[in-house]
Image (cartoon, helix red, strand yellow):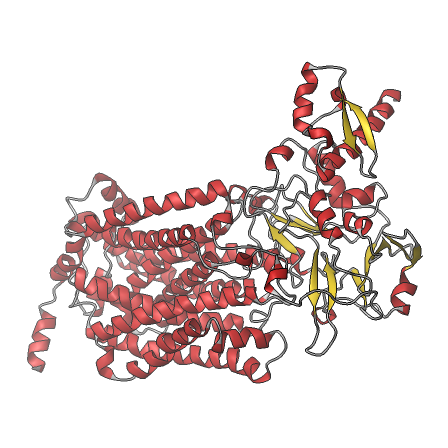
Amino acid sequence: MNDLQEQKETTLSFEKIKKDILRPMQNHKGLELWIAFLITVISVCAWAYYVQLRDGLGVTGMRDYVSWGLYIANFVFFVAVSLVGMLISSILGLLRIDWITPISRIAEIIAVAFVAVAGLVIIMDMGRPDRVVNVLIHGRFQSPILWDITVVTTYLTISLLLLILPMIPDLAICKNELKKASPLLKKLYNILSFGYINTPGQYKHLHKMIRTLMVLIVPVGLAIHTVTSWLFAATLRNGWDTTIFGPYFVAGAFVAGSAGLIVAMYFFRVSYKLKDYITDVQFDNMGKLMVAVCLVYLYFNLNEFLVPGYKMKTGDDVHLTELFAGHWAIMFWSSQLLGNVIPIMLLVTKKFRKPFPIMIISLFILAGAWIKRYVIVIPTLLHPHLPIQNVPQNFVHYYPSAIEISVTVLSFALALLIITVLSKIFPVVPICEIAEQKGIEVKIEA
Amino acid sequence: MKEETSNNSRRKFLKSVGITVGAAGVVSGFSLLGAAKAAAQEPGETVNLLTQDGQLVQVDKNQLRPTVTGPLTELQKRGREGIAGKSFVMVIDLSKCRNARKCMAACQNHHQLRPDQHHINVLQMQDAEHTAPYFMPKPCQHCDNPPCTKVCPVDATFKRQDGIVLIDNERCIGCRFCIAACPYSARIFQWTEPKDAEKYKNLTYNIEANVPQKKGTVSKCLFSADRLRENKLPSCVSSCPNGVYYFGDQNEDAVTNGTTHETVRFSQLIKENAGYTLMPELGTKPRVYYLPPKNRAFEFNGDLLNEENLH
């Protein structure tokens, strides 16, 4: 048994790794169909956004009291999932944890796609997107929105660099191997490989840069989600006016991001036939990591809800009663149980950390994470300090409109499209790093 | 020099007329724009207009212009600076409010708002289960530590030297952070095309009235800053039939009742009547003071929080 496994590993030559990883990039039936499907969805939903632009935000379910709705919940969700890039490739990478090698690029791709779409979602939520340049012309640095724009763009930039720099050796391989690629792609590989031929000097420089960026992205990653939480915590509203929102959001982001990564890992393993690279070991370890981050998140949830729930201060009482036992109870408890407590209980068992079960569990965690953002944003706005009176009935409730849901679908389809395209033109598993890790010599022709 | 003065006085006159048109609507079935368009073709004709103080006046159609105030930049500059030496305060006597809602209507007329859009909203309040309910008009509190202006990313909403918090809907990007930040729910958003958008289309934007309103931007109570510039009381204050509102300058320590036109010492008024501010624990330092609803001049006739009364 042991012998057999050893034999299998020794057969993993550099040529085989290259072949396995580059294959789905060259011909992958169904991928074109999937891209076409995504583009169709995006085009149809873009019409919904056009209607919103034409008629104003009145086409959404938002009104004067619930003035932030689905879009802001989506924004927080996108930012949360994008944090996985910083968690996996930086924190774990800096700790020199080796099982992350095959999945670190997938994590970076998710980070880039989700943070880019998060930026777009904010623009989609604006009443006057035509005036977005005002933020540059008249920007006030006292406003958390300015901080958010700063960290979102910084995070996107560093994530892009952390996607591309470690990929330089692989792109040099792509340049040589992918003869049938389109001229445009060839040009892209040519430019982005920067003439890399794996000389010791190049290797040293490259890895120095990567490590610097890995250190840099840690504070930026923490900042992006902390500042996102401050958009809420900086107000005087019951349910948002708390001091632990920063770490609470960061902890929640690790949960959502890890779940997103596990789902993507499963998809690439099956669809790209990468079983030999994204192995059970990766899923098992991600399962353990998930238990850890879920426990941290659970701890923050206890603090966030139990302490004010114990006191039931005026203002908090209405809000918490609605969450625990009122209108929002089903969403609140399903996000807590399906998205946190039950996954912890299941994932402590090894058999649930196998690829398929953990992927299903991660889907629940992702859904729970999204619902959680929804119940963080909306119920608070429905319980302001002063009573809501003398306004039409639809100001007192919030139900997202069809337009709003379409624009939401648009943003999700866009994120998936970015991931799909990036994983189509770039190798999703790092070829050279895998080879290095297995002690196989990396040869790159000039 | 002489010409300039006459020009100015004409502008002043037209301004007051124009604002009236915007505020009270046009009498005699003429729309301002229609009249202005017609002006070119039919010289010498006159129209009847209602001035702000309720007088019917005849105006030569040639004198009507869709643009009734100065150029945008001048208005913006003046509007952002505020009135030097002033420190405006409002005192609302809750013992007098009978829920007449004349303030709400006057405000909506002045600021191009629909009946469901409130710069000022009369709320039916009850502080605790067994305490007496009362009516509470709630304008923007024009806080001295405003949570809304802090969070604005583009300085579209700001506090002036005279204490008024304004919104510049030529700059607002519609992020609605200020709405989330305001603990008094004092801000509204133009979710769709504002009321009578066509009619107001060609008016130069007056930041001190926030008219014309614009789709996709925030609006709020401005203490009728345009009227203050003409030494008039805010629309809500003047329109109250029950003497609820006092308005004035804290520097002069004088506030004037909008109904009785009686001027009293501000400090004395709030001292003798146990004046207070809303939610002082939030540290917003409101410029709107309330006198407690004791010895009410009426029986509370509202059905507290009855669904039917919410419209």
Q: Residue at x 28, y 52 (%)?
A: A422
Q: Residue at x 78, y 47 (%)?
A: B235
How many labels were placed on the picture?
A: 0
> Along the line of sight, which residue is nearer the eye, A398 or B180?
A398
Q: Is residue A409 visible?
A: yes
> Vertical placement of B169 versus A361: above or below?
above
Residue A227 lies, in percent from the top left, at 53, 63
Quarter of image, res B60? top right
Q: Is residue A197 visible?
A: no
Residue A313 lies, in percent from the top left, at 62, 79
| In-image side of B280 versus A269 (left or right) | right
> Along the line of sight, which residue is nearer the eye, A251 or B51?
B51
Quarter of image, res B193? top right
> Along the line of sight, which residue is nearer the eye, A338 or B305?
B305
| In-image side of B2 versus B202 (left or right) | right
> Along the line of sight, which residue is nearer the eye, A142 or B163?
B163
| In-image side of A152 versus A91 (left or right) | right
Q: Residue at x 87, y 65 (%)?
A: B270
Residue B88 lies, in percent from the top left, at 82, 53
Residue B108 lies, in percent from the top left, at 69, 47
Q: Which quarter shows the N terminus of chain A?
A: bottom left
Quarter of image, res A370? bottom left
